[in-house]
Image (spheres, rainbow, N blue to C red):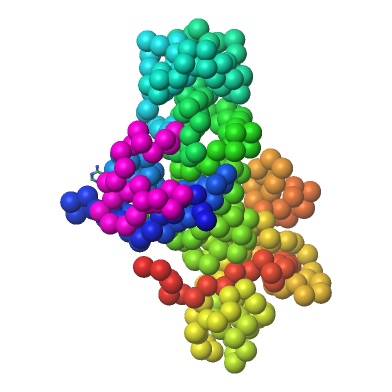
């Protein structure tokens, strides 16, 4: 049985529907990320899990027990929330000890636990500092240590790294992964940063307009999204118009060529019906197609050097534009007509009608 089971959860504020029809199971020890644009309901779900927000509908179960209306302090969840600041007048050690004192742990046990947590987050030398004497990253480590100190089964994190600069954010992402591994605590993590979600999560639940659009491991969602929203939200993508080519449901026509695609079966289009075809910039290559590859010609509109990669804007025979990222040693110039090739397994085909509202 899953550790945490959310069943048909909804939250409405006056006229705003913040969440609707949320179903999600989280296994013990999992790192699950709630990812979605601003206002999509991520914080509302996390607050409902923490017990700070009362859902309008649905249930939350922990170990099979209904906790939907249990008080926050009786859930024993740890949280690291945005703006949920450290106690400024307490030292690092006392910030970490706080929740243990509230729980009436014995002195010696508190001291041992604080030392253990300080070492876990690499702050052994800073125990007596006040929060204002710490860098942003150090403060965030203290917040995480404080949230983990009493041994929660679940740690809820709401954009804990969003205030940090890029380098520090990447370091802290690795730190959090390590803490997750070493403690075995279940993490439910909120971010609107898709790269962060991909790098850190066992599974990602992609939110939009208060719903979970798709949920799965990062690789699966990136490579085989089932919806246009996820195909466009997770990583960069090119969307092109196509149509079903003939009686064979796998045959598609797009960017001036015809090819077989086994990507989405069971579509309901008839021959001639329009489809959306997507292909990621990194899956477009320059050169003659070989074997099963799909070949087509395109004109280079512009190219720009972006470090390890060259970013090329191509115009296809149908007049649509697509972005390709190539390794920099491939030399192409604006105005040049080039042969392009794509592995058919890298092409996504979606119905034009969204399968979700
Ligand atoms: N207390 C509230 N009263 C009324 N509406 C609210 C309240 N809290 C959130 N909302 C609304 O509910 C929706 C979901 O908000 P939520 O904070 O869950 O989004 P989010 O996905 O966390 O966004 P962000 O990435 O910007 O933090 C938004 O439309 C928001 O305006
Ligand atoms: Mg939020």
- Give coordinates of residue 86: x percent, y percent: 40, 20
Residue 242's place in the image compared with 302, above or below, is: below
Of the four image quadrants, the one with ligand 1 is: top left
How many tags in the picture? 0
Left of 175 or right of it: where is 211? left
Instruction: Farthest residue to the right: give it.
Output: 291
Left of 219 or right of it: where is 164? left
The part of the chain drawn in magenta is: 54-78
Query: Does 175 appear in magenta?
Result: no
Instruction: Indicate the quadrant containing the C terminus: top left, top right, bottom left or bottom right.
Output: bottom left
Residue 174's place in the image compared with 207, above or below, is: above
Q: Is residue 40 visible?
A: no
Q: Is residue 126 visible?
A: yes
- Give coordinates of residue 97: x percent, y percent: 46, 17
Residues 249 and 125: in front is 125
Residue at image x 71%, y 67%? 342
Residue at image x 59%, y 55%? 217
Residues 121 and 264: in front is 121
- Give coordinates of residue 180: x percent, y percent: 59, 37
Q: Quadrant of residue 347?
A: bottom right
Residue 174's place in the image compared with 142, above or below, is: below
Residue 98's place in the image compared with 304, above or below, is: above
Query: Does 74 appear in magenta?
Result: yes
- Give coordinates of residue 148: x percent, y percent: 50, 29
Residue at image x 69%, y 62%? 284
Residue at image x 61%, y 44%? 199
């Amino acid at each position: 049985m899953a550790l945490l089971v959310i069943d048909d959860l909804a939250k409405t504020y006056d006229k705003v529907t913040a969440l609707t029809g949320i179903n999600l199971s989280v296994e013990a020890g999992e790192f699950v990320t709630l990812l979605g644009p601003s206002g999509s309901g991520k914080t509302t779900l996390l607050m409902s899990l923490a017990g700070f927000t009362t859902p309008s509908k649905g249930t939350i179960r922990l170990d099979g027990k209904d906790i939907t209306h249990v008080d926050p302090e009786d859930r024993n969840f740890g949280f690291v929330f945005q703006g949920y600041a450290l106690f400024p007048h307490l030292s690092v050690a006392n910030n970490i000890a706080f929740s243990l004192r509230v729980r009436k742990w014995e002195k010696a046990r508190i001291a041992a636990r604080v030392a253990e947590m300080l070492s876990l987050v690499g702050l052994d030398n800073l125990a007596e500092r006040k929060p204002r004497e710490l860098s942003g990253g150090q403060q965030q480590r203290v917040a995480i240590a404080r949230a983990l100190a009493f041994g929660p089964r679940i740690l809820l994190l709401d954009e804990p790294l969003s205030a940090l600069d890029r380098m520090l954010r990447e370091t802290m992402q690795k730190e959090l992964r390590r803490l997750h591994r070493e403690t075995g605590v279940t993490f439910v993590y909120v971010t609107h940063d898709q790269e962060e979600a991909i790098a850190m999560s066992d599974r990602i639940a992609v939110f939009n307009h208060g719903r979970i659009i798709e949920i799965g491991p990062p690789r699966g969602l990136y490579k085989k999204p089932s919806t246009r929203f996820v195909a466009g939200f997770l990583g960069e993508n090119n969307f092109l118009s196509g149509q079903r080519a003939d009686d064979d449901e796998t045959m598609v026509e797009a960017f001036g060529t015809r090819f077989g695609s086994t990507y989405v079966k069971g579509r309901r289009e008839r021959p001639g019906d329009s489809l959306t075809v997507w292909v990621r910039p990194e899956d477009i290559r320059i050169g003659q197609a070989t074997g099963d590859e799909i070949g087509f010609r395109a004109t280079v509109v512009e190219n720009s050097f972006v470090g390890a990669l060259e970013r090329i804007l191509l115009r296809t025979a149908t007049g649509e534009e697509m972005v390709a990222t190539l390794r920099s040693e491939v030399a192409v110039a604006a105005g040049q007509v080039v042969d392009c090739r794509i592995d058919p397994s890298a092409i996504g085909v979606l119905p034009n009608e969204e399968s979700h509202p």
